[in-house]
Image: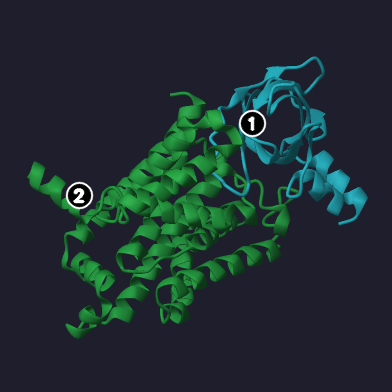
Amino acid sequence: MDDYALGVLTNIGLFSFVALSAYLLLIAGEMSFGQQAFFGVGAYAGGILTALYGWPLPLAALAAMALGALAQFLVALPTLRLRGLYFAMATLAAAEMARILFELLHWRRSIDGELAGPDGTQGFRGIRWIFEHGIEPMHYLGIVGVLLALVVGLFLVVERSKLGATLRGIGQDPELAAAVGIDVQRVKLGVAAAAGALAALGGVLYAHHNTYIEPRNFDIMLGVHSLAYALIGGLGTAFGPLLGVLLDIGVLESTRMFHGYRMIVFGGLVAVLLVFRPRGLLDERMVLWIRQRFS
Amino acid sequence: MDKAAFFLSLVLAQTPQADLRCVPTGEDFVYDCSITLTRGGQPLEGADVTVGADMPSMPMAHNMRPAKATPGTKPGEYKARLDLEMLGEWAIKLRLGGPVRDQIVVNYEFDSQGAKPAMGGHKMEHKKH
């Protein structure tokens, strides 16, 4: 496999984590434009722990996930009182606040005689754990793929469980769910924390793949795309966001002839698709049809 | 850190440093680039250099086909042709193999005249000190 294919596949894998975090909130009935913030929290936390303090990547990833979960839990505490568009706007505002905090973050230490660490708008260079440990790009793609498969597997198990039915029930009619005794606020806070952890896992993997991060990496474009992946791919199964990422990267790649205009073309395609399939390609009806057809 | 101490740290640094000079080829968004690599103040020779690019504000979405750089005529110099999608700021990723395994990311602003270090690029970092 050449460098180009490896890069594209790794990016598809990395994007999938943040898309799945947006999807998790969507099936619980909440639309977040702010998942890029928790992706960023994971990237910065993981990078700081490995590059500045010498933590092993797996441990740093776990710590970054815990921090991502805590961050989104704290954001969700006040914002989950809001509904619909207001919640979406609040998550966007929180994400922009996080991006500005990244711009203000200066955490520099001397490592082997050189200053390293986040330096505000100058970014954070030298997140070299995978190079220092001899991990080849193909191996890193394997790590991303295995982690993604584990996450998707967990989604599939949850979606077939009582918890999955509870989440979809809350997403479709929170009042009815509350009427049958479900603590809607508590479940949504748990969902938010899980979504934050998932986005943070993507972030820590991204930071170590790229070796360099900066605040602009975590702006609104990433948030909009992660939401679009879930909406395009479909809300009927965890494979939906993955399909969305594949279509996005695939469509973008296949329309390279448009050069700088390809994002406009992609935006048009998204708009048309959402008019005809508002819950995405793999929506609940499509998933049911596939299950009936192949079971 | 004062200026002298900063430059001393650059000389002592074992982390590879990169400098780019790019000129437009005449074809839209295509540039011929000369990359100078140093390590500890000395030219870094014999490296396998692969050049990729990404846009900082939309990471992972612009999957540019990486270009293999070829050795130039001067010590530590490498040549590569970059085929970008648009003008603007790009994070240029230099993946090094051979004597040094590493990745350097430098931000450059590409326009119709060529490329210059951008905000967030290491050149700005130098100026700051």
Q: Position of residue B16 (x, y in %)?
A: 72, 35
Q: Residues within 10 Å of mark 1 (few under 14, many from 20)?
A: many
Numbered label attached to residue A286: 2
For the residues marked 2 and 1, what is the alpha-carbon distance in whole angstroms?
39 Å
Tag 2's secondary structure? helix
Display colour for chain A: green
Q: Is residue B52 above or below residue A241?
A: above
Relative image position of residue A183 (x, y in whole percent)? 26, 82
Q: Which residue is mark 1?
A: B84
At label 2, the amino acid type is Met
User: A190 or B98: which is nearer to us?
Assistant: A190
Q: Amino acid at mark 1?
A: Leu
Label 1, secondary structure: give it.
loop
> What residue is at 48 percent from the left and 67 percent from the top?
A67
Instruction: Provide residue A154's location: percent of width, then percent of height.
Output: 26, 55
Taking depth in this image into account, of B79 and A139 the one nearest to the observer is B79
Residue A113 appears left or right of A83: right
- Which of label 2 and label 1 is nearer to you? 2
Quadrant in which the C terminus of chain A appears: top left
Which color was chain B given? cyan
Asked if residue A136 can be seen in this view, the reply is no
Q: Quadrant of residue A187?
A: bottom left
The x and y percentages for residue B43 are 79, 26
Can I make out residue A51 in this image? yes
Residue at mark 1: chain: B
Query: Residue at the location (42% across, 53% down)?
Result: A228
The residue depicted at 53 percent of the width and 62 percent of the height is A37
A124 vs A295, nearest the viewer: A295
Task: Return the mark for residue A168.
Answer: none
